[in-house]
Image (tube, rainbow, N blue to C red):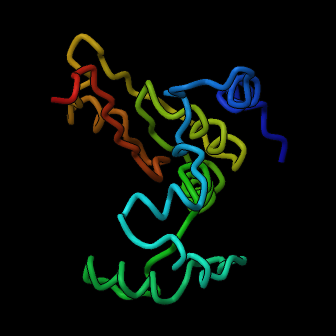
Amino acid sequence: MRVPPFKLDLWLAAHEFATPPIRFNLASSTGPAWTLGEIGATGGGDPRKLDDVRLSYAPPEGSQLLRERLAARHSVDAESVLILTGASEALMVLTCFFAAPGASILLPRPVYPALPVMARAWGLAVREYVLDPARDFAQDADTVLRAVDATTRAVFVNTPTTRRAP
């Protein structure tokens, strides 16, 4: 499988570690680079409690306790919960799951740039429906449903907004 370069990753690689550092990086999906002391101080707790935290690889599906607590919160079985490390990993799992000969997925445009790249890498045909910024990217169910056909394995719904948070 040959995946084409992901333009957002190339941009982040060029600018994420800039000198001088970027003060407010609004292009990244990660949080700030904090020290352990800063993390401990965010909850007003004692940062020394971090001394007992064991850092190692977690099971690929996530820790059993975390999966059980999330499952209980959403009234599902813990075996139905999968812990992933970010959006790209989750999208990779989904596109792999939906991949089948002759299958397609339906995506909004705009969409997270990695999604169509990963879908095509898994052999899925990518079809799009357009979100109109003049309508604040509002979804139109009839437009989306008209684009569904016999090959459609998944429809992704993403609604960016131009509205400012209060």
Q: Residue 94 is drawn in which quadrant?
A: bottom right
Q: Residue visible at 60% across and 85% down?
A: 52
Residue 74 at x, y = what percent? 27, 77
Foreground of the two, 69 or 7: 69
Q: Point out the residue furthest to the right here.
A: 2
Residue 166 at x, y = what percent? 15, 29
Residue 59 seen in this snapshot: no
**Does residue 20 lie above or below 50 as drawn?**
above
Q: Residue 27 is drawn in which quadrant?
A: top right
Foreground of the two, 27 or 107: 27
Foreground of the two, 127 or 35: 35
- Lateral position of residue 20 relative to residue 134, left or right: right
Q: Residue visible at 45% across and 39% down?
A: 106
Residue 22 at x, y = what percent? 61, 24
Residue 130 at x, y = what percent? 37, 22
Q: Residue visible at 40% across and 46% down?
A: 155
Q: Residue visible at 23% across and 31% down?
A: 139
Foreground of the two, 11 or 50: 50
